[in-house]
Image: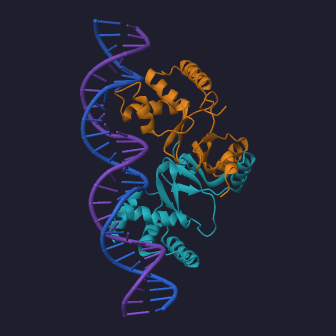
Chain colours: A cyan, B orange, C blue, D purple
Amino acid sequence: MKPGSCHTECQQVLHLAERLCEGRGARLTPQRRQVLEILCASPKPLGAYDILDLLKQGVPAAKPPTVYRALEFLLQQGLVHRIESLNAYVGCVHPDHPHASQFLICRDCGEVRELESQSVERTLGSALRACGFKADSRVVEVTGRCLRCSEQETP
Amino acid sequence: MKPGSCHTECQQVLHLAERLCEGRGARLTPQRRQVLEILCASPKPLGAYDILDLLKQGVPAAKPPTVYRALEFLLQQGLVHRIESLNAYVGCVHPDHPHASQFLICRDCGEVRELESQSVERTLGSALRACGFKADSRVVEVTGRCLRCSEQETP
DNA sequence: AGTGTTATGTTATCACATAACATAAGCAAT
DNA sequence: ATTGCTTATGTTATGTGATAACATAACACT
């Protein structure tokens, strides 16, 4: 079972998202839901205009602000993440607990995996504390080759 | 003495850059040198079009590709870094030894500081090893408030 | 001088993101 | 239900960052 590409898994995430938003009094409108659905169904990060193209199937009148507004909401709710080094977005694998995102980006297959290393979290946290820096958001993005790709060929 | 804003320090970096390029057989041409100079002289990260505006003082015919080509070279040589979460560029403080860049970005004063924590390096490295990921480049960028700014006001 | 390589000039265009203002939908209180 | 507020969406235009493609010039080596 590959991450992000499984239909049933995607459904689970959507239900969880609904519950979370409900509990927070946040409105997961049809449009926002569709954008989340698009991201969850994609095994790879999507650019805003990729999302736009897909969204148009359900919302023909969709335009860039449509997507960016939905993304803004979903990012706030922790339901999706933005990959800074790709200008792209991914559905969050486990939106139930807040976490600083750490991503592994394979330059060959394009897949993005969330890392969630506690030790990286901790060491980064103490480094920040040591220099008195109050963090709002932490970005950890590693580009390279995933295990599968580096096993397949050896350049 | 504030990082990046000191003229003599900037000169030192430029001389070092010349030596490094010389040793590698890389050509630090006048244009590339000017772009590096612009970045070193700035206490804050600059966008490509900011650099372009400044570069035009010395190279009136400069256009976007002029800047991006210079940046490409300087990035390859490790003389500048790109800040992914800002789409901006900074001169490298210590280009002599290669290092994974870690940045602290103050959302108030806009200053960017290089962190270089060995422990973050190590833990991230071992986390990557543990999942068989071969890293090409590591991006660590933390946005928040620097010590100075959080001391000045308390919202 | 000749030739291959690397750097620069030039035009156009692509890709990503948001400002600004208009309309509509949801919701609470009378 | 109507009013009135708040939040969400529609729409047009534009701002900002980056690169493709092709032409010319500078360099380095024999």
- The answer to whether residue A1 is visible is no
In this rendering, position of residue B49 left or right of residue A111: left
How far across and down, in percent of the image, does residue B117 sit? 70, 42
How far across and down, in percent of the image, does residue B60 sit? 36, 26
Q: Nearer the viewer, residue B100 or B55?
A: B55
Q: Residue at x 49, y 22 (%)?
A: B28
How far across and down, in percent of the image, does residue A152 sit? 52, 47
Q: Residue at x 37, y 62 (%)?
A: A52
- The answer to whether residue B87 is visible is yes
- The number of numbered badges drawn on the structure is 0
Q: Nearer the viewer, residue B117 or A11?
A: B117
The vertical placement of A28 against A122, above or below, is below
The vertical placement of D17 against A64, above or below, is above
The vertical placement of C29 against B65, above or below, is below
* Quadrant location of the C terminus of chain B in the rendered image: bottom right
Displayed quadrant of residue C6: top left
Q: Residue at x 41, y 27 (%)?
A: B57
* Quadrant location of the N terminus of chain B in the rendered image: top right
Q: Nearer the viewer, residue A72 or C2?
A: A72
